[in-house]
Image (tube, grey):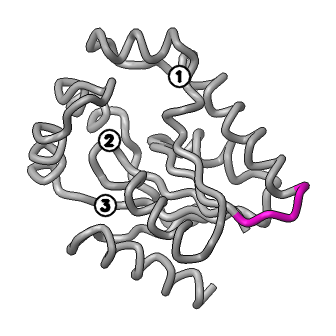
Amino acid sequence: MILIVAGVSGSGKSTVGALIAGQLHWRFADADDFHPESNVVKMRSGIPLTDEDRLPWLHAIAAWMDDRIKAGESAVVACSALKRSYRDLLLCHRPDATMVFLEVSHDELARRLAMRAGHFFPKQLLESQMKTVEQPQPGESVRTVLVDGDAAWTADKVIALLDRA
């Protein structure tokens, strides 16, 4: 199984994803590591990414997922997957993949980003992500998880969902 933990920047997807991977003894990847340097430079400069910027990044993540599936490995990847088209690209033709989308209030996201140091994603880009994000809709193969506790609590909620799948 491949679990994609999705959400906007600051939602806790990397922290929660790493916790889940650790508890389940699965491999973990952070999609931030798949960005080409040109994307990182844009974001560091406060320039929002376009669909064209994101497409090679999404294909790199999908290739990593396919490698895990071919190897028979379970894994977790943290990825923003802001738009339905991005989620579709990652999930399409991958029955072994599932996605949870972490839902966090705007105020909490802003608070978290203001406290985060050393990350290439500046807090000013939150508004761009909030304009870009398409919340998962009925009919998508995505489960929304309300983040109403700490990261460990959220990881436990996601694992409980997996157990019911």
Pointer 1 with pointer 3, Cβ within 8 A: no
Marks 1 and 2: which is nearer the front?
Answer: 2
Mostly what secondary structure, the magenta segment? Answer: loop
Using the numbered discs, state the Cα–Cα distance from disc 2 to disc 3 in whole angstroms.
11 Å
Q: Mark 1 vs mark 2: which is more N-terminal?
A: 2
Q: Which residue in the protein does label 3 denote?
A: 103
- Residue at image coords 79%, 57%: 94
Determine if the magenta segment contains residue 73.
Answer: yes
Task: Please state the horizontal and vertical placement of residue 71, each as a whole percent of the image.
Answer: 89, 57
Name the amino acid type tagged 2. Answer: Ser
Residue span colored magenta: 70-74
Q: In terms of secondary structure, where does tag 2 sit?
A: loop
Task: Please state the horizontal and vertical placement of residue 165, each as a whole percent of the image.
Answer: 63, 85
Marks 2 and 3: which is nearer the front?
Answer: 2
Q: Which residue in the protein does label 2 denote?
A: 9
Task: Please state the horizontal and vertical placement of residue 160, each as a whole percent of the image.
Answer: 49, 86
